[in-house]
Amino acid sequence: MTVKKIVLAYSGGLDTSVILKWLKEEYQCPVVAFAADLGQDEDWNAVREKGMATGAEKVVIEDLQEVFVRDYIFPAFRANAIYEGSYLLGTSLARPLIAREQVRLAEAEGADAVSHGATGKGNDQVRFELTYMALNPHLQIIAPWRIWDLNSRTRLLSYAKEHNIPVPVTLEKPYSSDENLLHISFEGGILEDPWNEPDPGMFKMTKAPEEAPDSATYVELDFVQGNPVAINSEALSPGVLFQELNRLGGENGIGRLDMVENRFVGMKSRGVYETPGGTILRAAHRDLETITMDREVMRIRDSLVARYAELVYNGFWFSPEMQLLQKTMDEAQATVNGTVRLKLYKGNCMPVGRKSEQSLYRESFATFEEDEVYNQADAAGFIKLNALRLQIAALKKK
């Protein structure tokens, strides 16, 4: 492969630090290191200095926090997206944004190739490359993990040592992590044995539930068309709002998850996640829908959630089917306006109140007291008609 310039998705961690040096040596061309600030706890000056010291022509760092929340997290949460019943798609939602900006930068820099640090075993390679191909099919794609001989963490560490590249991973603590505003994920190392409990000292965003405050925290979340817009009546931008949800959830031990999931490439993988703000947001959003969304609309929407989540997880964010599903999900959110009150306590997030001017709940209909809007005798015919096929089946058996 002959290339003129490469734009690398760069984090400054073990993999991409080694990849940056390897690309320079292998292709003998300029490499632009692109780092996306998605809210991770990072010393960006150090990342820039390390990238330049490792051989980058330039290091571009872009603050994408507001974009990430507004255009990726919020649309997914409007759809109540959740993968295999547990995973709130923190890494899956970040990759198409990083790859989109990588493509934009490649075009601006006159680069003809893009590269990433995803391995040949994981999902991220698919997410990055489907985005590259969907947005600019003319770019060449370099996936070092699929073509080099540095095929283990041990060999990467040795390469880094040989080339004087400082890295944050050691053989004693080899698990890797991915962090952004939505979550932190941990995998690899001792976590590869699904019987091993995660190290309590590993977690960064959340307190252990048993160490959370002994008194409950109450919070009110306002929504407009399925999007959260205010916390305790204070209007906040998407990024700032999500940061506050993370703080509230983290302090109360909310959002830890330990699961084995099915990767798109076919194998099962054990992941440990912290998603404090996302856990609160999903609970509040679903609760508000119970009073604002029509029953049959909700049933159709819910039938599409698993498919939507699979598209996100598998990397098809920029696909025609995703556009169709997002429009459908957003149409269902037209009436999801109102406020939810939640009680946060030692790892639990419990909706305890909800109100909306578009509420479909009517106390006069639902009351157990005397009412003038519902004739209970009407229920007899309703039940008989619904039982008709059951009665016919029973008669047939006899």
Image (cartoon, rainbow, N blue to C red):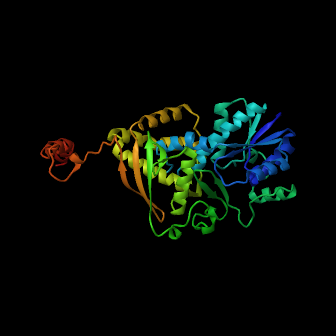
Along the viewing direction, whichever of 341 and 375 lies nearer the viewer: 341
Left/right placement of residue 169 relative to residue 285 reads: right
Along the viewing direction, whichever of 157 and 366 lies nearer the viewer: 366
Image location (x, y in percent) of residue 35: 72, 45
Along the viewing direction, whichever of 226 and 313 lies nearer the viewer: 226
Left/right placement of residue 330 relative to residue 135 reads: left
What is the total number of numbered labels drawn onto the structure image? 0
Q: Examine the rendered structure and indicate whether residue 217 appears above or below residue 226.
A: below
Image location (x, y in percent) of residue 135: 65, 31
Along the viewing direction, whichever of 260 and 72 lies nearer the viewer: 72
The image quadrant of residue 207 is: bottom right
Q: Residue furthest left?
A: 377
Image location (x, y in percent) of residue 390: 21, 45
The reply to whether residue 255 is in sight is no
Residue at image location 78% in from the left, 56% down from the top: 156
Residue at image location 64% in from the left, 37% down from the top: 130
Residue at image location 56% in from the left, 39% down from the top: 71
The reply to whether residue 291 is in sight is yes
The image quadrant of residue 9 is: top right
Residue at image location 49% in from the left, 32% down from the top: 324
Image location (x, y in percent) of residue 134: 63, 32
Q: In which quarter of the image is the N terminus?
A: top right
Q: Examine the rendered structure and indicate whether residue 18 appears above or below residue 141.
A: below
